[in-house]
Image (spheres, helix red, strand yellow):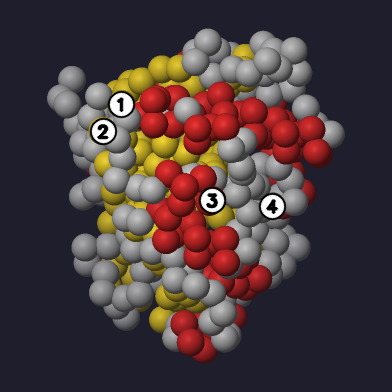
Amino acid sequence: MPSDPLPLRRIDHVKFFVGNAKQSAFFYRNAFGFDVAAYGGLETGLKHEARYLLRQGLINFVLVSSLHDDHPDNYRLAKHGDGVCDIAFEVDDVRKAYDFVTGRGAKGISEPKAMEDENGVYEIATIAAYGDTTHTFINRDRYRGTFAPGFKPIDDDLYGPRQMHPVGLKSIDHIVANVEEGQMNEWVHFYEHVMGFSLLVSFDDKDISTEYSALMSKVVQDGKGRIKFPINEPAKGRRRSQIEEYLNFYHGPGVQHIALTTGNIIETVGNMRKNDVNFLTVPRSYYEALPDRVGKIDEDIEALADLGILVDRDDEGYLLQIFTKPVEDRPTLFYEVIERHGARSFGKGNFKALFESIEREQARRGTL
């Protein structure tokens, strides 16, 4: 098999289906620092849904809400609450990508089609992934408009007064899926044998466990190593793990968290806190042991401790990371902010401290 049988240029965008896209856009704009770059809705000729495109660095989020009770995705709100419904990839050839994966067993959702407006041709096709999450292949090489047909540019200043502090998020580092117990290897197989990904690293319940709960995780990546998807499943423990909690409230497999990169995590997290984003915290004792565990780093440990930023090191360098609390009422979707200094790993040395922090939140919710 060639090293990259399915060339993917990048993650084009992440699509969310939400109850009120306008209000969700306001949250991501004022809390996470996104610009509201484009809009689709009644004013642009869309009669069935409203769409907002949010951009920051190389990150594109698309927020979608239905306008009528017969929208085919309305079931998502009752079943899942707000959440990620699609992870889209930019590709060289939509038809070739779609035929490749469906020929290897992927379930087609929407066959390749060319959508055309006054700005050119936009090509798109969609396949099924875990749960009711989908992957969409996109090519806009012949499209000169704003993002996609049905979207029109929107002046961010007209969206409302900007109260937030600048954040400085740059790109998507990885996107994490939670699946049912016993299903992790099945979806690793899907990404390896259908999508042409490869296994990067595995973590078992000895790596990711606390006194009460545990999980298993495997990370797959595309042929170029740019797109990384950790896939988690629950493992046996004394109490309910964070994965079980997610599955119970999301009612099935789905995207657990999205990791976003920054070039200055201290500044980014400091401003996100000023924007009222809530992060998980770890005990102060974590930082007392940090110099011996990770060695020399460029950042001031007191500054990291004040913000609750975690540090880990691998053979390639070190990383800094922090995790938000869930951004929905349900304890489902959350975000990671990460700054890499050579490290290619995922913070294995932080797993215990992180999961104990999550368990403290579970205990507060009564779901541990």
Q: Nearer the viewer, residue 303 or 218?
A: 303
Disc 1 and disc 2 in contact, CB within 8 angstroms: yes
Q: Does residue 46 show up?
A: no
What kind of residue is marked 4?
Glu
In the displayed structure, 3 sits above or below 82; it is: above
Residue at the disc numbered 4: 328
Which mark identifies residue 306?
A: 3
In the displayed structure, 102 sits above or below 207; it is: below
Q: Residue at x 52, y 26 (%)?
A: 351
Q: Position of residue 362 (x, y in %)?
A: 75, 34
What kind of residue is marked 2?
Gly
Residue at the disc numbered 2: 317
Q: Residues within 10 Å of mark 2 (few under 14, many from 20)?
A: some
Residue sitting farthest toward the bottom: 158
Disc 4 and disc 2 in contact, CB within 8 angstroms: no
**Residue at mark 2 to residue at mark 3: CA–CA distance:** 23 Å
Q: Say whether disc 4 or disc 3 marks the residue closer to the N-terminus.
A: 3
**Residue at mark 4 to residue at mark 3: CA–CA distance:** 25 Å
Which mark identifies residue 77?
A: none
| Element type where label 3 sits in the image | helix
